[in-house]
Image (spheres, rainbow, N blue to C red):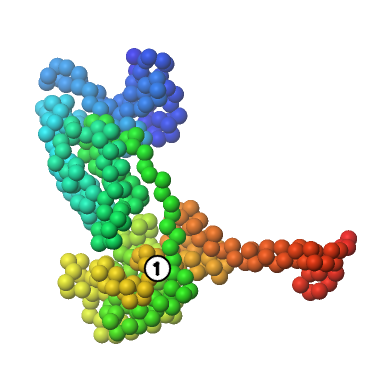
Amino acid sequence: MATNKLLFTYERLRKLQPAPPGKRLILWDKRQPGLALQVTSANTKTFQFRRWDKQRREPKILTLGQYPALSVEEARKIAAQKLSEMNSGIDIVEAANAVRGESSLDTLFSLWLEQHAKPHKKSWEEDVRRYNLYIKGPLGRKTLSWFSTDKIRSWHLSLTKLQKQRAPKGDTISPSTANRALALLSTIFNKMAPEIPNPCKGVIKFKETSRERFLKPEELDKFFNALDDPATPADLRDYLLLSLFTGARRNNVLSMKWDDIDLDLEIWTIPAAESKNNTSMPVPLVPQALNILTRRKTGATCIFVFPSEESKTGHYTTPTQAWRSLLKRAGLKGVRIHDLRRTLGSYMATIGCNTVAIGKALGHKDQKTTEIYARMSLDPIRNGMVDAVNTMMAAKKAPGQISNQSGEDVSNDQ
């Protein structure tokens, strides 16, 4: 067994070559005592904690997780924690075995929620909802030693057969929803049980197709008519219209604050702490949005544009039932609130805006996210192609005499 020391970095570990056939290579991190990387002949790279236990006079070896699923920085944090535990007299291997044999997934999720999700994730409430819907029932009470890749694969497959909540009978959850549940489960294992192999590793995700739903002109007419209906609550109407006119994400519109809005400059700035991309995002306010905000500003006494005394957050929450009632009145099917955001991007593409402008308007950090709208901007190109083909087809009626739109003879152009 060869032993080497180097400063662990993502690139250095990525470029490491496999160990010779039948052997394994152990590398040590120069920065964090006890942190090692085992490389096999199959090029599997696994972080380990390796340290001599002075109190018990024996070596302790603990698997932390596989690279790159477990990052170098995370591996260092876990190794530092294990070193501290060992120095405090804890038998880290025995403790890990106890966790593996006794802790349930519910216990791990609760710890992950308090230690990682709530302090660092804006969408932790969505994780709780997803866990309760798809993971807790079939897997929550299982101890960690019960889990295996085959069992996770079977569970993942079964999710697509589940009835979707509050949907017509036979309408099952989508492959993308099943994949999000798998990703959440994998994260829990990576963060809270790095000393055991992640049973989610090796489970192949379902193929997903990007959603392209947006409101077409005839649907927009029905949508606006339903909004103007007296049965539509004023807050719901204003919320949906601002979602459509700004293209902002649902939660950002729900939690919109007056302090972030400059009516004179006609800009709404979503703070970095509330932005999905962790950077502040200026949103231009079109006249229709300004009219709504100016009207709501009159007499406003709350920090939120959409205040709610019934909500724990103090602001309006997702109007699920009211949205369904609106769609029913409008005669629209298969439309989500998020599709209003997609509708703005689609119409920007239709009138010729490039994907850079659309991405800026919608706050896309990755330009690939905006590529779906590129297909919407093909109409001008298509129109030109139609004209060209029509001109070519004219030759079928009058061979040797093809005219352009101006009527000039172009058949013998030199």
- Counting from the top left corner in percent of width and height, residue 110 is at 16, 46
* Rendered residue at 42%/57% (across/down): 211
How many C-alpha atoms fall within 10 Å of the one at disc 1: few (<14), some, or many (≥20)?
many
- Counting from the top left corner in percent of width and height, residue 378 is at 59, 62
Question: Is 390 located above or below residue 106 in the figure?
Answer: below
363 or 348: nearer the eye?
A: 348
Indicate the quadrant containing the N terminus: top left, top right, bottom left or bottom right: top left
Q: Which residue is mark 1?
A: 340
* Rendered residue at 21%/73% (across/down): 308
* Rendered residue at 42%/16% (across/down): 20
**Amino acid beneath label 1:** Leu
145 or 215: nearer the eye?
A: 215
Horizontally, residue 170 falls left or right of residue 115, namely right
Horizontally, residue 289 falls left or right of residue 297, namely right
Question: Is 192 located above or below residue 342 in the figure?
Answer: above
- Counting from the top left corner in percent of width and height, residue 23 is at 37, 15
Q: Is residue 133 visible?
A: yes
